[in-house]
Image (tube, rainbow, N blue to C red):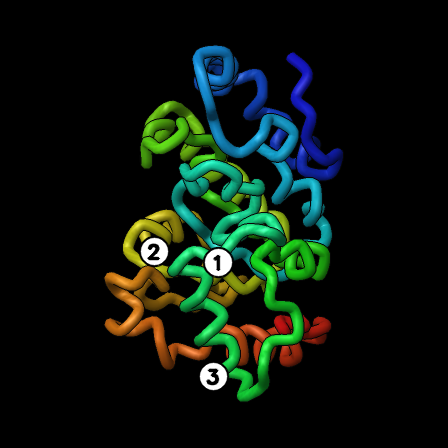
Amino acid sequence: MEVKIEQSWKEALMDEFSREYFQKLTEFVKDEYKKGAVYPLPQNIFRAFELCPFDNVKVVILGQDPYHGPGQANGLSFAVPPEVRLPPSLQNIFKELESDLEQPLVHKTGDLERWAKQGVLLLNATLTVRARTAGSHQSKGWEEFTDAAIRALSDKKEHIVFILWGNYAKQKGAHIDRDKHHVIQSAHPSPFSAYSGFFGSKPFSKTNKYLKETGQEPIDWL
């Protein structure tokens, strides 16, 4: 079965594509797209991998589901297309970013492609969702696939920063070797939890501090 995913990721995850769960997942997702609206667009399902090849990954920001409203999901966790109004979680991420770095944002759109191209893998646990139905593609195989991606990064690379926001991301962080990598975790940026430990957590400056300490280029977050 031919999977259209960036070549270095294809090599890193080669074993997954022939496994039974992935073949069932593929059939399920194809069927869902035939039945009705599913997000993101098919060409953007693996966009996080396309923009951030395996060898380039320096930072991983884990999300849960793609946005399920029309025109929002673009294949990158927490991100939306440039013309789309910022969702509340992303508004809070930008608020914390400006506070953390004590500078105003230069790029105010929510696409986040600029982060991905610098080595930030914006990875959702589930890569597709049925329109207006949060969690509709959970427990179909995507979580197993994205766990494999995290495991591959943890096993084959060193000195990655994993940013885990909220309990779901923290649970997914079980696959990370914390002797080789740096983990930053806090409450989720959602309006329901941002004031319970996300605001003031300074993930962006902490990430850049670690990257510099390990001889890597910091991320231009602004």
Which residue is disc 1 drawn over? 86
Q: Position of residue 206 (x, y in %)?
A: 51, 78
Q: What is the distance, in whole Å, between disc 3 and disc 2 at their CAs?
A: 24 Å
- Residue 33 lies left or right of residue 169; in this view the side is right
Q: Quadrant of residue 2?
A: top right
Answer with mark 1 or mark 2, whichever residue precedes in sequence: 1
CA gap, disc 1 and disc 2:
24 Å
Q: Is residue 158 left or right of residue 202?
A: right
Choose mark 3 or mark 2, whichever is in front.
3
The amino acid pointed to by label 3 is Ser
Q: Amino acid at mark 2?
A: Lys
Find out whether the residues at labels 1 and 3 contact each other: C-beta distance under 8 Å: no
The residue singled out by tag 3 in the image is 99
From the viewer's perspective, is residue 100 above or below residue 153?
below
> Mark 1 against mark 2, which lies toward the viewer?
1
Does residue 102 sit above or below 116 in this rendering? below
Task: Please name the residue that numbered disc 2 is placed on.
Answer: 170
The structure residue drawn at horizontal position 43% and vertical position 42%, both measured from the top left corner, is 67
